[in-house]
């Protein structure tokens, strides 16, 4: 149970986000459009958490997806939603600004 929670919130094994991006990972920013306009990772896709189900069909289930938001809470929820919809390679990147520093 504890390991599941750790992995859900991005506290599991260390992930090399830079390598994932170089290999073609999709960065999915689940903040609101207003938050996204104030700053985001270049090349990321804005799919607000409230509208995520509308964007799922635009993503390939075999793609590696890195979710991000402002703090990591919404991105954890997005990871869970994607996993429950058949995505297998999903990572919670946490806050977008800290993720940007890791890539």
Image (cartoon, rainbow, N blue to C red):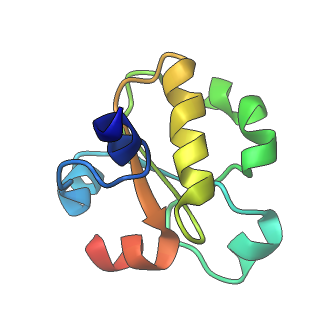
The image quadrant that residue 17 belongs to is: bottom left
Q: Is residue 67 above or below residue 70?
A: above
Considering every residue shown, the one lying at the far top of the view is 86
**Quick check: can you spot residue 59?**
no
Q: Which of 6/52 is in front? A: 6
Q: Quadrant of the N terminus?
A: top left
**In the figure, is residue 64 to the left or right of 20?**
right
Q: Residue at x 55, y 52 (%)?
A: 75
Q: Residue at x 57, y 74 (%)?
A: 40
Q: Quadrant of the C terminus?
A: bottom left
Q: Is residue 1 above or below residue 47?
A: above
Q: Residue 10: image x %, image y %?
A: 36, 53
Q: Which of 89/26 is in front? A: 89
Q: Residue 46: image x %, image y %?
A: 66, 56
**Quick check: can you spot residue 1?**
yes
Q: Residue at x 57, y 18 (%)?
A: 85
Q: Is residue 51 above or below residue 88?
A: below
Q: Residue 55: image x %, image y %?
A: 70, 35
Q: Is residue 37 above or below residue 91?
A: below
Q: Which of 75/41 is in front? A: 75
Q: Count the marks.
A: 0
Q: Residue at x 52, y 62 (%)?
A: 72
The image quadrant that residue 78 belongs to is: top right
**In the figure, is residue 20 to the left or right of 25?**
left
Q: Residue 51: image x %, image y %?
A: 80, 41
């Amino acid at each position: 149970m504890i390991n599941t929670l750790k992995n859900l919130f991005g506290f599991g094994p260390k992930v090399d986000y830079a390598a994932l991006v170089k290999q073609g990972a999709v960065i999915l920013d689940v903040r609101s459009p207003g938050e996204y306009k104030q700053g985001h990772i270049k090349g990321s896709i804005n799919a607000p958490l409230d509208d995520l189900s509308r964007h799922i069909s635009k993503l390939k289930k075999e793609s590696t997806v890195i979710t991000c938001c402002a703090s990591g809470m919404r991105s954890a929820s997005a990871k869970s939603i994607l996993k429950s919809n058949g995505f297998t390679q999903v990572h919670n990147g946490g806050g977008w600004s800290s993720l940007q520093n890791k890539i």
